[in-house]
Image: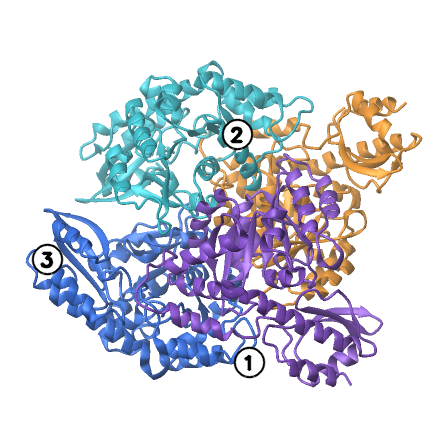
Chain colours: A blue, B purple, C cyan, D orange
Amino acid sequence: MNFASDNAYGAAPEMLEALGAANHGAAPSYGEDPLTARLAAALADIFEHEVAIFPVITGTAANALALSTLVPPHGAIFCHRDAHIATDECGAPELFTQGARLATLEGPRGKVTPEALEQALSGVAVGSVHHSQPAAVSITQACEMGVCYRPGEVRAIAGAAQRHNMTLHMDGARLANALAFLGCTPAEVTWKAGVDALSFGMTKNGALGAEAVVFFRAEHARDFEFRRKRFGHLISKTRFISAQLLCALEHGRWLGWAAAANALAGILANGLGTISGVEIVHPVEANLVFASMPESLVQQLRAAGATFYDWGPLGGGCRLVRFVTSFVTPERDIEMLIEACG
Amino acid sequence: MNFASDNAYGAAPEMLEALGAANHGAAPSYGEDPLTARLAAALADIFEHEVAIFPVITGTAANALALSTLVPPHGAIFCHRDAHIATDECGAPELFTQGARLATLEGPRGKVTPEALEQALSGVAVGSVHHSQPAAVSITQACEMGVCYRPGEVRAIAGAAQRHNMTLHMDGARLANALAFLGCTPAEVTWKAGVDALSFGMTKNGALGAEAVVFFRAEHARDFEFRRKRFGHLISKTRFISAQLLCALEHGRWLGWAAAANALAGILANGLGTISGVEIVHPVEANLVFASMPESLVQQLRAAGATFYDWGPLGGGCRLVRFVTSFVTPERDIEMLIEACG
Amino acid sequence: MNFASDNAYGAAPEMLEALGAANHGAAPSYGEDPLTARLAAALADIFEHEVAIFPVITGTAANALALSTLVPPHGAIFCHRDAHIATDECGAPELFTQGARLATLEGPRGKVTPEALEQALSGVAVGSVHHSQPAAVSITQACEMGVCYRPGEVRAIAGAAQRHNMTLHMDGARLANALAFLGCTPAEVTWKAGVDALSFGMTKNGALGAEAVVFFRAEHARDFEFRRKRFGHLISKTRFISAQLLCALEHGRWLGWAAAANALAGILANGLGTISGVEIVHPVEANLVFASMPESLVQQLRAAGATFYDWGPLGGGCRLVRFVTSFVTPERDIEMLIEACG
Amino acid sequence: MNFASDNAYGAAPEMLEALGAANHGAAPSYGEDPLTARLAAALADIFEHEVAIFPVITGTAANALALSTLVPPHGAIFCHRDAHIATDECGAPELFTQGARLATLEGPRGKVTPEALEQALSGVAVGSVHHSQPAAVSITQACEMGVCYRPGEVRAIAGAAQRHNMTLHMDGARLANALAFLGCTPAEVTWKAGVDALSFGMTKNGALGAEAVVFFRAEHARDFEFRRKRFGHLISKTRFISAQLLCALEHGRWLGWAAAANALAGILANGLGTISGVEIVHPVEANLVFASMPESLVQQLRAAGATFYDWGPLGGGCRLVRFVTSFVTPERDIEMLIEACG
């Protein structure tokens, strides 16, 4: 009963087949191979836009490399207080940017609001050499609370960013889950809504380890290649990363896997919702379920062998806990979890 | 006829089987999985020593992370002028170390000598705040010219390093090729010879993409974990990297693959050696063949479809070129290359 | 009527005499001179403790260099939300530390409380590689709101820091003002209260430009020398910085100047306090006066030629503004300011 | 008998007067003061060109800040093997640039030649992500061997730099000495000869501590302000740095002081040249004298109380030593030095 993270589960069988298919003969190294070219074309197709794409192996690398391309060392990056870049990357954004500042925002359900952004910006002395200068906004889709930004919400944030000459980065570690929920096109929630750069994640969604930085504006590409190399993220046999991403994109598999994970989260949330004393805290729009439950139940579930994250005490003897489903989380495990609540 | 690099070829079929075998059920992320634990045990066994091991995806990451653990920002890293860290990593060592200096040494056939090291050190004002302070030596095994350090040579360099309170790093991107040639144990050419930290590469030798940083002294481990994370190299599904490394180590496969690559290099060198006007420049002790040949022959081979690296003009209308074999370079390609010289 | 900053005023005449006296003949460069040795002795005497001292030219350099010595790149620095390092150094702490995180705390009147510190620490996953690790606390004495930490308050913060294996840094840009107010010894409010490293500022208090980093624990000194050099802060003719600091320390001048500045702030606050609609917001314990006043009065004062900082709107048509006095702010200017309120 | 460095001597008396004159009343901080504005005008006048100027306190800061503005992290800086940035700044250029590479060149008498530059560039794979990309050339005027670049030499280097899309930086720590020797205008040997950025030093020439970064192209200015701040080099009471630089520039004092130092070096060289076994190794074109002398004489001079730098053994029982004169080195000390050779 592993609900700790969507990266606790392995890869889709199709991924391994794709790796096998990619493993024939010689190919140019460092992303000059035909599969990576095909990936670039596939992403341009899916996003309905010219893109510069760069496969990497981790989400932290994708985020930090993308941000360091968008933001000067004296820049500030506005993000939600609970953003992965602010809470789970051990200072990688600051490191990669040579010391840019993360300016964190409050916002309901883990989402940045244009109002919070505008308010934070109202206190900044633009042009003053004493203060980190607004440079980029970063939002997570689906966000860390499992809630999705609607295209209109992204557009509103992008509008605020643009009014202040900032770029917009999207951490799309769970973009597929968001798309499966929103039912919109990838374009509608990214560049059409004002996103400049995207961390396009597949590791949480069927891959062994495959992400890509996607730039919608060509001027960001060249510098990026050097950054990727210098931070050790230019992979010699890139074809094996590209093969994973292509495999996911073909036949819409990525959306299917994400939909499966979302559905499992829904089942889990419904089941937990029937348990007395348990409350589902946020709308379940992706593959994350946040629940308030009594401490005793938390211990009971752990004793039964369930793994999940503790988000801290809530008062009244309750704790906030997070359950994550993946595309292959066994439905039986969810049933066992609910049974263990009894 | 691809002789450009050993990373131009793909992965051993056993690697894909190992990935499939690793792809069952849930496992803790970020290297807390059982396969990574097994890898640690296997490496301790193979090196006959306690080790702290950290899987990563690229050799540049392995080198730069290892060096940044060994070397303070005000340190100097002594290495050969032709070392990969000096010529092919676009300043990654300087970046990861926050500005340490690479102090390059001359030396025959791409190898550092204790004499060159001592001479370089004799000019350093130890303790002076104006000068980067000697902190580590880095050697490549097999070296970039395809020549191997004998254990006694490593010991002599380590001795010089230790006399100056420096640590010794080995870039083992082709360690297997060196071991296959030397016929010694991994221990004999690493910690027994004074190596403190090792970039243990398998990407050039059968893996899709798998390296490990190996520390022989425990005190380097903890800080390293944070560095790996912060530079974006802590991989969530680490089990898929560890599985590759384990696959290589099991049944001595890594040495077998390396021996195969070495043997192919020998065949290639022998064949080229019969061509008039071609001279094999360095002893072929690994899977690299450096040859001097007339410009016209270089063009002839390229026209015939061979890919290989140009190492620059040599005078007399000749150029230095490099051919690399991998464990699966087709022997027929070598024959075709020699035929194309006709 | 310049109340913008204490660094808007120049240097004490004694400072210029001291520079003249230091300007005789040759002396070793880079801090090896006799005046710097005398300064070290004087500081050891004044602090009643062995110290390692390093003159620099700016407070930002002192803070960032000190913190980068105390804090690893993966560390977190806890400080007040209004701390100078958090608000006015454009990311210098992040830059110098290679990406450490500033974790800002709320607290009344600009002061860190042990409670806020403990609460923030309670949410940190100590040892987790995903999160910046608590490494240091930084407090400002007198704080940015012009309020002073009592020795007992510093001890309580240091106690909390030590319980969590953190060091304590004090930004003493206005330490003299605090001492003049508190009436305690320098030792009582620094190392005796648990401070490990001090940014000892004199630029705001009579010097042309002179600060020193003071370490109370010897192990921090060696690494620091290299940092200072590498960040461009090892001054060749250091004697001219040391001469300024010595001049201030001799005959207790620094405390006299600070007392004068504090007294002028008191006069200013008393004067403003008599104005209808004006409220002094914080106790005036140093040379800073924070006042709430109607927007119209702010404009009236600016029109009359007064310069001072705007701290933002307060609601009710009022703004928070800051007046700073220096040791030589003309008392007549204060009278004119009060008159201009009429 | 101090011939260790030109920074071993203090400041010109006029400097102290200028500081006194600058010490009146309040002035805006951080370089917004009238004296800094006057300095900017004076430098524009002297260089006959629009300039962006930034006072700082050390030459290392000036060099590293200027270079980090000109050079991206993946860039390479070409300089002479003996350049101060390569030998005496403990890796500051690498630190400030976030890991750019210094590519050192050989060249007679410490000077870069266009030929050496072109040859080094011929081996660079331009555009390859694996290699630091040529970005800037840095030359020192007068160079570290006390020899001056003629305007034509600078033009030739600049031409080579421009052909490769590189900028040209001049470390002008001893620019005044070079101008005093060359007899040309500041413009002729800087921007008219293709220099883009200049470290304009006065610390070695009469100041207490005052340098300025001078950009001849406006696009470099804005980013620089943030860098200067973030590295701790934005000085609150900048007026006291600007006052020093202005003092030097007024009435041509800087050239007079430099001429005096040069003349003393000439006297010293002439004197040493009469000593049997001593050879002046480089033309004395500034205030540096490099001499070859027997080991025994080196010891004899040190025993007599002379301080000077040892440049290492030369063979034949001789050593290379360096004597530096300043604008106020007592002529009597030189006589004593020569006498001590007897």
Q: Which mark is residue A278?
A: 3
Q: Quadrant of the C terminus of chain A?
A: bottom left
Q: Nearer the viewer, residue C246 or B128?
A: B128
- Crowd class of label 2 (few under 14; some 14 to 19; many from 20; radius 10 Å): many
Give the vertical position of A249 relative to D268 (above or below): below
Find out whether the residues at labels 3 and 2 contact each other: C-beta distance under 8 Å: no
| Residue type for callout 3 | Val
Under tag 2, what secondary structure? strand
Q: Position of residue A172 (x, y in %)?
A: 33, 67
Asked whether residue C341 appears in the rendered view, the answer is: no
Per the model, the C-alpha gap separating discs 1 and 3 is 55 Å
Query: Tag on residue D223?
Result: none
Label 1 marks a residue whose chain is A
Relative to residue B190, is residue A340 drawn left or right?
Answer: left
Q: Residues within 10 Å of mark 3 (few under 14, many from 20)?
A: some
Residue, disc 2: C54
Have a look at marks 1 and 3 and say if they share a chain.
Answer: yes
Determine the secondary structure under disc 1.
loop
Q: Is residue A119 left or right of residue C60?
A: left
Tell me if label 1 and label 3 are in contact, CB under 8 Å.
Answer: no
Q: Say which residue label 1 marks.
A: A25
Q: Nearer the viewer, residue D317 or B220?
A: B220
Left or right: where does residue B228 sit relative to residue B272? left
- Tell me the kind of residue under disc 1: Gly
